Amino acid sequence: MTTTGTPDGDDGGAVLFDVDGTLMDTVYLHTVAWSEALRQQGFRVPMARIHRCIGMGSDHLLDALLSEERDRDGDEALSAAHDTLYAQHWSRLAPLPGASDLLRACATRGWRVVLASSAKKKEAEVMMRALDADDAITAVTTASDVSSSKPAPDLVQQALDKAGVPAERAVFVGDAAWDGKAARKAGVRCLGVLTGGWSREELHEAGMEVVYDSPSELLGRLDDSFLAVPPGWA
């Protein structure tokens, strides 16, 4: 990983990226893995409901799917089952078109690029290998680094700390309403992409100022977006 420079006397800016569904085409793989993990433990949950919770960490996802009043003794087994099932896809995980080039383009423009993923550390490492863009990434923060995952703001705040910039000098890019809500709670502007299966209207309602079809479209329109130049750069 590299740390991009900043102008003398200026803190520069950071662009914080969600990973699943934003940079990696993994949302529906997670949906299937959670569906099977829940089924194995006797829970029948429609995949449509599960899909709407992808992007949360397992702590919030199970609350949303099984209620906060449930017996939590089985949560660890459920999470472990999901991890085992999802790991079967690791060798085939692929970035979304344009995702790696988008990271490099942001770094070239002077942004500090930080990944802010609700995945656990080992899973995030697998996705980073698939992205193959370590040269553009300043830092990574995962669910393993915080006590509460998205939609809580902890991951965003941790990413800001690793970037070394205040909220007003950062932009978050995500694919789910949980990304927009977490960014808004942390005081960070947010862009959206539609590759996670949420609608444009839903992402706008969650606080995303501009929504693009895909990372590839954002890359192609980078010079016309507010990612064109970091704060303080000429």
Image (spheres, helix red, strand yellow):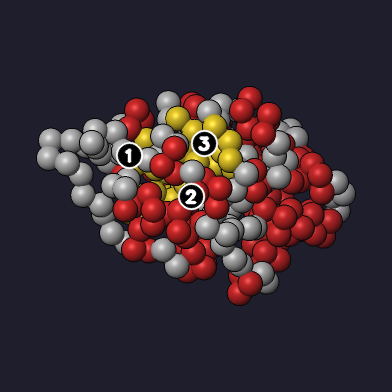
Three-letter code, disc 2? Leu
Left or right of residue 166, residue 89 in this image:
right
Query: Which residue is painted at 53% across and 28% down in the image?
Result: 209
C-alpha separation, residue under disc 1 versus residue under disc 2:
13 Å
Q: Determine which residue is flagged by label 3.
A: 191
**Mark number for residue 219?**
2
Left or right of residue 132, residue 169 in this image:
left
Three-letter code, disc 1? Val
Residue 60: horizontal and vertical position, in percent?
Answer: 63, 39
| Front position among marks 1 and 3 | 1
Three-letter code, disc 3? Leu
Looking at the figure, which quarter contains the N terminus?
A: bottom left
Residue 75: horizontal and vertical position, in percent?
Answer: 68, 50
Q: Residue furthest bottom?
A: 91
Looking at the figure, which quarter contains the C terminus?
A: top left
Residue nearest the observer in this picture, 225 or 140 = 225
Labels 1 and 3: the sequence-earlier one: 3
Tell me: residue 212, above or below residue 4: above
